Amino acid sequence: MKKIFSVMLASVAMVSCVDTVILPDNKTVDDDFWQKKSEVDAVVSTAYAQLRDETAIRNMIVWGDFRSDELNMTTGLPTGAAYRTALQQIYSLNIETENAFTSWYPFYSAINYCNLVLEKAENVIAVDPDYTRGDYEANKAQALALRAFCYFYLTKVFHDIPVTPGAYMNSSADLNAPQATPDSVLTMCIRDLEEASKNAIPGNTYGDWRDKGYLNKDGINAVLADIYLWRASVNRDAADYQKCVDYCDAIIKAKKQAYEESGQRRRWGEDDVEKDYYLSDYDDMYSDLFGQNGQNADESIFELQFRNSNATNKGLDQMYYRYNNASSNSYGYLKAAPLYGTVKSDGSGIWFNSVDQRLYEYLYDATSSSVEQFGVRKFVATVSAGVNNAADSHRETRANVMQNWILYRLTDVMLMKAEALVQLYEFEKQAALADSRAADETYNQAAFDICKFVNDRALSDANKSSYAMKYSTYKDKMESLVLAERARELCFEGKRWFDLMRYNYRHMTTKADLTKKLSDKDYAVVPNSSEFFELALRKYAVPSAMKAKMRDERYLYMPINQDEVELNTNLQQNPVYKSAAKY
């Protein structure tokens, strides 16, 4: 009788890094399951669904936003709130290896489902005439791409991670997956993504949520651009920066072509004017990207689908809206640091003017001097704050938060390209100096133009003449401009900590080595940069007091969960962390 492929290890203790994705003997996915096209499609969908797990969303917010200068813990959380202690450890930089936010199981669960597809799906071609070679290649591309995305994400968070040898289908499998260096993980991810790209679904194939819910050609290119930007920043490699630019250009070109050929031409300003980038305009940007009636916007690339799965995004709900997923009168675990709700006209903060509409769309009570913490409005509010640069203090009552989680969108890609272009300009300046000539500013100007385009979208037509950015102001500080524009555009989307890590790697006095594990005897400790400290620690009352707890590269990464280390003999803990039992 066909085994039901719906629950994973519900009644078996979940212990090692792959225990969480192993099917127990009585739920093994036998060959008699893999008989129909619909069954393959169901497993592919289940792989994506693992990243909708509330643990995955909570962790992505904590790993990508809370660890940075963006978020603080909400004051007044009840002592018994489930994640209060774990968040307090992270905020105080005293993370223990039992911390709840060291869990990586949703990512390895997704990886295991991807491996199941890669091992089992091809055989379905022979038994179901409706399942074609083309169907299989498309499924294979998604499995390779999603697996690569997961591995890349994990290595950014933990540095040295296990790479599973294949699918785990029963509880008797060898669970001791070996740990790999970041260099080998990134190389594997690039290889798999390039293979996936050969048969990837083109963007805008379906005309519905699947164009953003599946990793299509644009999504694969976005992950590749992200990987190359990460590796280039650590290795300080011009070739990798150029690869990032190339993949960003491929996405930008595809998005532009899709829009111009779609015939939609709606709400995008002067539709008869060709543009380099087609973004939702000033009036519609929040509603299209984050509003209850928007999401899966034309400019989006890859989103985890909650709305179209009719599922509550509990992780986002807990972090930004209602810590207990219940009372509409409660509040999320996290609120924005004061820096993110305040205008600093001298340029020392995030917002340098009070007419940037994103300030009011993304935060409650923006610019108010009467609040100590600013609530995160992005993702939470169902409608725009309006277009008159007025702060919104009305927190809506919602029974369920079925809000997609955006992983990549076009402005993210544009600003990745700008970041890479700025670094290519640095290489050009070095070459010009060696050749005793003036540097060609093409890269620098192009990076500025991207930042200006993104920033202009957040300004009303009436304000553009007075507040639009000028190249002469920023040409000598373009790296800082790109970093700040990414903070303004992408705040609270799980990006900031990784942006700061890349920035740090570029400014370390000694280049880090991705070919070494943090626990290797010949690993060389690399101190973090003063430029990084200045930004990453500025949410603290006394930033200088926190430096000792973030002094070198090892502290940038999360510890591996203690249970994983004890039960997988191949895992070595990040040496700067300890179990609570050893304190």
Image (tube, grey):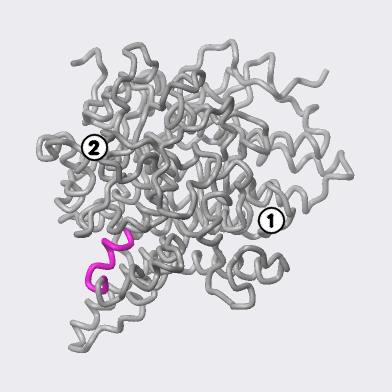
Residue at horizontal 66%, vertical 59%?
203
Q: Is residue 190 above or below residue 397?
A: below
Labels in figure, total: 2
Query: Which residue was labeled with disc 2?
Result: 555
Residue at horizontal 56%, vertical 33%?
52
- Between 127 and 202, the one lying in front of the other is 202
Residue at horizontal 53%, vertical 23%?
20
- Between 275 and 216, the one lying in front of the other is 275
Query: Which residue was labeled with disc 1?
Result: 201
Q: Is residue 174 above or below residue 453?
A: above
Q: Is residue 481 magenta?
A: yes
| Label 2 element class | helix
- Numbered badge on residue 236: none
In contact (CB < 8 Å): disc 2 and disc 1: no
Q: Is residue 148 among the parts visible in the rendering?
A: no
Q: Position of residue 138 (x, y in %)?
A: 71, 51
Residue at mark 2 to residue at mark 1: CA–CA distance:
39 Å
Prevailing secondary structure of the magenta residues: helix
Locate residue 3: give its quadrant: top right
- Between 30 and 251, the one lying in front of the other is 251
Label 1: few (<14), some or many (≥20) within 10 Å?
Answer: many
Per the rendered image, the range of residues in magenta is 474-483
Q: Is residue 127 magenta?
A: no
| Label 1 element class | loop
Locate the C terminus and report the quarter of the image it occupies.
top left
Label 2: few (<14), some or many (≥20) within 10 Å?
Answer: some
Q: Position of residue 504 (x, y in %)?
A: 24, 52
- Residue type at mark 1 is Ile
Q: Is residue 103 among the parts visible in the rendering?
A: yes
Residue at horizontal 47%, vertical 37%?
163
Tell which circle, 2 or 1, labels the residue nearer the N-terminal end.
Answer: 1
Seen in the image, is 219 located left or right of residue 575?
right
